[in-house]
Image (tube, rainbow, N blue to C red):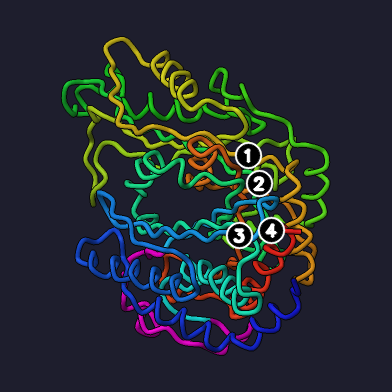
């Protein structure tokens, strides 16, 4: 099958592809706000019709929350991979509306100093990214009459509101949805220019707790000196979480942390990451993580412990001389490798409770943590996809990590027993979740061409 003819068709039909994306972006599919429930369902219906228009057997599947869109297409041969493509069609709220330069649901092409962009809510996260794959499939089908392999489409309508229906849906439909490999298009280019396949995702554990000492707030003139202050205890605990080298001191914290493979380390070094500029953009200078690790390792491949919030006592205007009864904090741990979130939670609580004076208590308000995800790039599909991306973009594609957590990749691994290739074409300045979200026209165009190249590479 000719790839060149597919790429030419993508180029020629790009204006129509943009208009189709605009139609989807006009639907106010804000999943977290019940006022937009009908709009979310309308977006699902739109996608079902769009997939059906290119010959894909698609349907809207109801859940306890917002619907899933599932589509299937049979391939011409059994000796090529069966692919699952995942994206989400819901979007974040648009508040504060006054900070938008135009109606967030009235998408438009805009000329900027950096080039032409698609402006509007969902342009980058994730409607624009989702539609790159759909448009690649459309062009392939138009040129060759059939897609090159079996493809399952899974579009979610709750990603921006915590995916409450996703796990039950995967469990109930595991046999139907299990494929050889998953493609997830909800990431970005490295430093807005280098095509990337994300192969490492950090897990997440959160702790929200309150330490209680005296039975009520105390007058500092009457009790100061004799009464132990909960904020003093909390401050000492938090200050002791890291040593002078930036390492986390919780006993057993590094159990399961694996060393970075040398080939990946060398590839990351070749990215020439400018950590000074990265930190300088937010008013910082020196990296604060483990001193014996490179900045990219600190972000992508090393675990962290961060204090996300601290409060206690009187924080209003003026001054109130009290020793507070309680002091609270929120912490998060980003996890890597084989770190066990349950074991780390137990170790942290032991560390905390051992530092409490007699008579002090602690109350926890937490949710279940998630482990890290690491993909096996020994699967030839990964290198085929990386080379295909390199053929489309000026810079060669790289395997990268992600400092954040994308739970769907872990769910696919744990429930469907398949690895995921996370490939996206967003840029660092796309302002996702913020006013004036945009998606570079170059990303939409070359992203669509990239998927056509990847489909070709995976099925040869």
Residue at (22% x, 27% y) in the render? 325
Magenta residues, dominant SS class: loop
Looking at the picture, how far across and down is residue 430, in whole percent? 53, 70
Q: Which residue is mark 4?
A: 196
Q: Secondary structure at mark 4?
A: strand
Q: Which quadrant, please, contains the N terminus?
A: bottom right
Horizontal arrangement in the rendering, residue 33 relative to residue 48 (left or right): left
Q: Which residues are magenta?
A: 89-117
255 vs 260: above or below: above
Looking at the picture, how far across and down is residue 455, in whole percent? 67, 63
Q: Secondary structure at mark 1?
A: strand
Callout 1 crowding tier (Cα within 10 Å): few <14, some 14–19, many ≥20: many
Q: Which residue is mark 2?
A: 199
Q: Are marks 2 and 1 in contact (CB under 8 Å)?
A: yes
406 vs 257: above or below: below
Callout 4 crowding tier (Cα within 10 Å): few <14, some 14–19, many ≥20: many
Q: Quadrant of residue 57?
A: bottom left
108 is within the stretch colored magenta: yes
Residue extending farthest to the left is: 216
Q: Quadrant of residue 212?
A: top left
Label located before the other in sequence (2 or 1): 2
Q: Which residue is mark 3?
A: 75
Q: Which residue is mark 1?
A: 374
């Amino acid at each position: 099958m000719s790839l060149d003819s597919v790429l030419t068709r993508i180029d020629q039909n790009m204006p129509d592809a943009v208009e189709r994306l605009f139609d989807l972006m006009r639907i106010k599919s804000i999943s977290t706000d019940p006022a937009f429930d009908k709009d979310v369902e309308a977006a699902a219906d739109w996608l079902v019709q769009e997939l059906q228009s290119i010959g894909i057997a698609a349907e809207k599947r109801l859940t306890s929350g917002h619907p899933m869109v599932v589509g299937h297409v049979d391939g011409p041969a059994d000796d090529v991979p069966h692919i699952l493509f995942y994206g989400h069609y819901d979007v974040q709220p648009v508040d504060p509306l006054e900070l938008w330069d135009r109606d967030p649901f009235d998408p438009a092409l805009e000329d900027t100093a950096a080039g032409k962009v698609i402006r509007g809510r969902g342009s980058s996260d994730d409607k624009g990214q989702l539609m790159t794959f759909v448009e690649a499939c459309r062009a392939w089908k138009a040129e060759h009459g059939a897609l090159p392999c079996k493809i399952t489409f899974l579009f979610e309508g709750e990603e921006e509101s915590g995916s409450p229906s996703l796990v039950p849906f995967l469990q109930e439909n595991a046999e139907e949805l299990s494929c050889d490999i998953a493609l997830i298009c909800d990431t970005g280019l490295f430093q807005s220019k280098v095509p990337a396949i994300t192969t490492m995702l950090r897990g997440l554990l959160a702790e929200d707790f309150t330490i209680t000492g005296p039975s009520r707030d105390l007058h500092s003139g009457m009790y100061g000196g004799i009464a132990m202050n909960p904020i003093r205890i909390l401050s000492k605990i938090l200050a002791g979480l890291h040593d002078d080298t930036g390492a986390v001191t919780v006993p057993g914290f590094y159990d399961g942390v694996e060393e970075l493979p040398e080939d990946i380390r060398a590839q990351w070094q070749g990215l020439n990451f400018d950590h000074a500029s990265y930190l300088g953009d937010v008013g910082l200078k020196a990296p604060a993580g483990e001193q014996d690790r490179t900045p990219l390792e600190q972000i992508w491949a090393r675990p962290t412990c961060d204090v996300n919030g601290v409060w206690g006592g009187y924080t209003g205007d003026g001054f109130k001389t009290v020793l507070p009864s309680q002091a609270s904090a929120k912490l998060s741990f980003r996890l890597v490798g084989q770190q066990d979130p349950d074991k780390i939670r137990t170790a942290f609580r032991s560390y905390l409770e051992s530092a409490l004076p007699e008579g002090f208590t602690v109350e926890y308000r937490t949710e279940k943590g998630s482990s890290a995800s690491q993909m096996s790039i020994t699967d030839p599909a990964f290198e085929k996809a990386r080379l295909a991306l390199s053929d489309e973009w000026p810079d060669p594609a790289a395997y990268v990590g992600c400092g954040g957590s994308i739970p769907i990749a872990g769910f696919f691994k744990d429930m469907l027993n398949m690895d995921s290739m996370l490939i996206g074409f967003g840029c660092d300045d796309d302002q996702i979740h913020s006013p004036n979200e945009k998606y570079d026209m170059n990303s939409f165009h070359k992203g669509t061409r990239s998927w056509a190249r990847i489909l070709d590479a995976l099925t040869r």
